[in-house]
Image (cartoon, grey):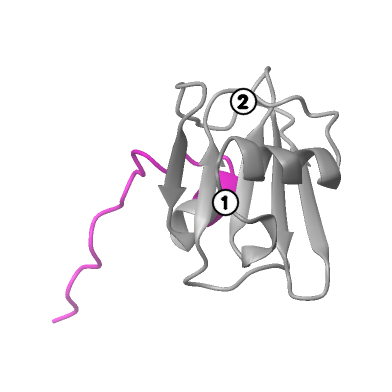
Amino acid sequence: MIGPGTGVRVYLACGVTDMRKSITGLSVLVQDHLLQKPSSGAVFAFRGRKGDRLKLLYWDGQGFCLYYKILQKGTFPWPGSGDAVARLTSAQLAMLWEGIDWRRPSWGAPPARVG
């Protein structure tokens, strides 16, 4: 995914969002419900009712970028509370975008020592 680098602030709009909303509608949600400035350089994530659709809103300094992903199988892991907001790291955002449960990632065993 081409987009914000590491260290970016990420906010999840908990609950469900109407995926018909455009950049303008999502910007209003960011201001009114998340109480953030849409052009702050942070990434704002929204999930649809069925859980298989994800929109990311991001201001890159010149304009808004809107990323939209629909999973063929499964759903995006998401907190359930309606009006709340959750913070993620950029690494958790990368896991979310890939459909990996960022709340409980499955870490493999550490590399074996070659002797």
Horizontal side, residue 25 vs residue 53: left or right: right
Q: Nearer the viewer, residue 62 or 93?
A: 62
Determine the main secondary structure of the stretch shown in magenta. loop
- Quarter of the image for residue 29 reads top right
* Relative to 32, residue 41 above or below: below
- In the rendered view of the protein, which quadrant contains the C terminus? bottom left
Measuring from the top left, give residue 100's x and y in whole percent: 50, 41
- Look at the numbered disc 1 and give the secondary structure of its residue: loop
* 105 within the magenta span: yes
What residue is drawn where x is 74% and y is 30%? 72
- Look at the numbered disc 2 and give the secondary structure of its residue: loop
Measuring from the top left, give residue 62's x and y in whole percent: 82, 75
Q: Residues within 10 Å of mark 2 (few under 14, many from 20)?
A: few
Q: What amino acid does circle 1 point to?
A: Gln
Horizontal side, residue 104 vs residue 112: left or right: right
- Mark 1 vs mark 2, CA separation in Å: 30 Å
